[in-house]
Image: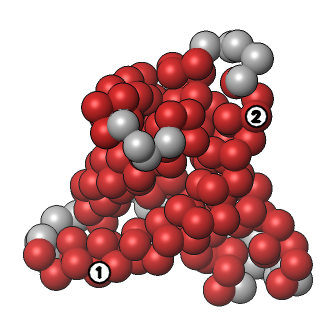
Amino acid sequence: QFERAAMPTSPPIHRSIPQKIAIVAAVMGSVAGTLTGIMTWANTGFSEIFLPNWGISFLKAVFVLLPFAFLLMGLFDKLLSRVMPGLAPMKLRIVLGMVMAVIMQSLMAVITAGTEAGFGDMAVLKELWLNAFITAFPVGLILALLLTTTVRPWLLAMLRA
């Protein structure tokens, strides 16, 4: 058998609390900006109302939805670990990513559709929600899988250091 050479490991980087907050905010902002941008574009195109609607949806997603998402992700991670105890860690992260993609994009689509049409006409809201959800889902699924398999473990390690 071949022995693996020990890979040199660099000492953990210790970041200040403001640096940690900035990194988490950048990740959250990137995800929220990308998905709300796609969802707004799906319903309005690049019309004169695109930027104001995107800005409002983005702010609602960042300050309301995404903090909730990080808490929800931790809860689902624990729940899935208990429900599927024999699943390999990477497979567990993939399942978590798929579950989070559906939940979070559903909620982001509600925020985006509500920003664009309000909540008065449920038929219009449903149509805009569905259009936003379907259009953004492929990108959101890729982002969710990337977040749960690579970014989230790195962020957790960084926050613990």
Spot occupied by residue 155 in the image (x, y as percentages of width and height): 62, 68
Q: How crowded is mark 2: few (under 14 residues within 10 Å), some or many (20 or more)?
A: few
Spot occupied by residue 94 in the image (x, y as percentages of width and height): 31, 52
- In contact (CB < 8 Å): disc 1 and disc 2: no
In the displayed structure image, the side of residue 155 where residue 143 appears, left or right: left
Q: Is mark 1 on a helix, strand or loop?
A: helix
Q: Residue 78 carries which label?
A: 1
Say what amino acid the circle numbered 2 marks: Pro
- Does residue 143 appear in the picture of this structure? no
Q: In this view, does 57 lie above or below 79?
A: above
Q: Which mark is residue 2?
A: none
Q: How crowded is mark 1: few (under 14 residues within 10 Å), some or many (20 or more)?
A: few
Q: Depth check: give the residue in front, 89 or 38.
A: 38
Viewer-nearest of discs 1 and 2: 2
Quarter where residue 115 is shown? top right
Residue occupying image coordinates x 63% and y 56%: 60
Residue occupying image coordinates x 30% and y 66%: 89
In the displayed structure image, the side of residue 150 where residue 34 appears, left or right: right
In the displayed structure image, the side of residue 137 where residue 160 appears, left or right: right
Quarter where residue 148 is shown? bottom left
Q: Depth check: give the residue in front, 71 or 126.
A: 126
- Does residue 76 appear in the picture of this structure? yes
Q: How far apart are marks 1 and 2 (CA)?
A: 38 Å
Q: Earlier in the sequence, mark 1 or mark 2?
A: 2
Spot occupied by residue 83 in the image (x, y as percentages of width and height): 11, 75
Say what amino acid the circle numbered 1 marks: Lys
Q: Quadrant of the C terminus?
A: bottom right
Q: Name the residue under label 2.
A: 52
Q: What element carries label 2?
A: helix
Quarter where residue 3 is shown? bottom left
In the displayed structure image, the side of residue 74 where residue 66 appears, left or right: right
Residue occupying image coordinates x 69% and y 46%: 56
